[in-house]
Image (tube, rainbow, N blue to C red):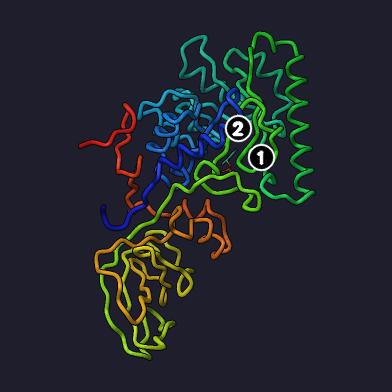
Amino acid sequence: MTGTAALIHLDNLKHNLETVRRLVGRERRICMPVKANAYGHGMVPVARAALEYGCDCLAIARTEEGLILRREGLTCPILIMGHAPEEELADLVAGKLEPYGGSPAYLEALERAADRVLPPGEMVSVHLKVDTGMGRIGYIFASPRLRLAGVCTHFPASDTDDPGDRAFTEGQLAALTEAARMIRTLPGAGENGPFLVHGANSGAVAQHGESCLDMVRPGIMLYGYEPLPQSPVGVRPLMELSARLVFAKRVPPGQTVSYGRTWRAERETWIGTVSVGYADGYNRLLSNRGKVMINGRIYPVAGRVCMDQIMVDLGPELREKVGDRVILFGPPPCPFSAADIAEELNTISYEVCCLITARVKRIYLSEGKPCIIGKEGISHGE
Ligand SMILES: *Cc1c(COP(=O)(O)O)cnc(C)c1O
């Protein structure tokens, strides 16, 4: 296996999709958010693997992300959960991406873009957000260019068990279902055809089962992090950040290590150099705080995290060899995942994964072995 890499455990993605499938049932659609390079895991391979494992459609945040998926030959519905600038709308519409939103100006701009780039009679599927777009239903039903594909909302407080937050989410859900009921009674609803009612992100899937409606959009849970750690649903992290022990040297008591001399040996000890640094996305705030796993043993980070490397205290008796694999975080058997790193840094697992930088190669594993995810599916090569 190569030097510094993010190993992506696709078996865990499969397990997580099965977990979500069990929670939401056979009838509902599962839309996997693959925005932000699939939360740092690699957008195209993760999208292909998820579709192979039974996910129904994808969601992204930016036009360019959707266009990349289309260029790679993905034909499933792709929701674009964000407001695209006007100059991107022709590409968005031509790429058959499904925009999300409801401001009058946005709908009108989409209509104009459709007039420019779509053949006569073809329509743009739009998902209307209940909080912003309700006044525009009549406009959509009357438009020859717009079709209502979904009525949706987002639950920003679904991942806490605070009673006030739970009541807030329940209120949002009531507003969403009431809006959907009302829309179905409007003139034009019949010709428009069916639309999907959706809102549930990971927190809502985990603790607001009644919010799952026609489609769910869980992200973080599919990447393997519990939206409510206090009531886990049993997902497994996909990402393992892995590097190599590249050097080891014995240091005498009193010797300092790394920039700023913030770490000092209290006894004679072995200091190992590991090929990962903040330029890989291993946060500098983990200086003197992070831990690593080598051959099943845990060692602390010694001194400041550098751009391209860290030092670890391997103890007075050297048990590891130069060249050994070092795990910075990952699914079990590593005892710390991106969620634990996030807790240490006072942030969230989303950010820890998203900030793994482009120079870190993503290596995909299925059935525990490196694999290739091509247009024809997952294969193990030679
Ligand atoms: C990112 C996103 C999601 C997924 O949220 P998670 O917390 O990762 O489950 C769902 N809906 C929208 C609109 C999003 O932007």
Q: Is residue 11 left or right of residue 122?
A: left
Residue 114, relative to residue 362: is it above or below? above
Near mark 1 (Cα within 10 A), the count class, few <14, some 14-19 or many ≥20, is many
Mark 2 CB lies closer than 8 A to ligand 1: no
Is residue 247 visible to the viewer in this orientation of the structure? yes
Q: What residue is drawn where x is 41% and y is 66%? A: 292
Residue 358: x percent and y percent? 36, 51
Residue 18: x percent and y percent? 51, 34
Seen from the viewer's position, the closer of residues 105 and 380 is 380
What is the count of numbered marks? 2
Residue 199: x percent and y percent? 65, 33
Residue 346, relative to residue 139: is it above or below? below
For label 2, the SS is strand
The dot on residue 204 is 1
Residue 142, relative to residue 326: is it above or below? above
Seen from the viewer's position, the closer of residues 348 and 327 is 327
Give the image quarter of residue 376: top left
Residue type, numbered disc 1: Ala
Residue type, numbered disc 2: Val
Q: What residue is drawn where x is 51% and y is 13%? A: 122
- Label whose residue precedes the other's in the sequence (1 or 2): 1
Residue 15: x percent and y percent? 48, 39
Q: Quadrant of the C terminus?
A: top left
Look at mark 2 in the image and give the residue it sits on. Answer: 216
Mark 1 CB lies closer than 8 A to ligand 1: no
Q: Is residue 190 left or right of residue 375?
A: right
The dot on residue 147 is none
The answer to whether the residues at label 1 and label 2 have Cβ atoms under 8 Å apart is: yes
Question: Taking the image as four quarters, which one is ligand 1 found in?
Answer: top right
Q: Is residue 93 left or right of residue 142?
A: left
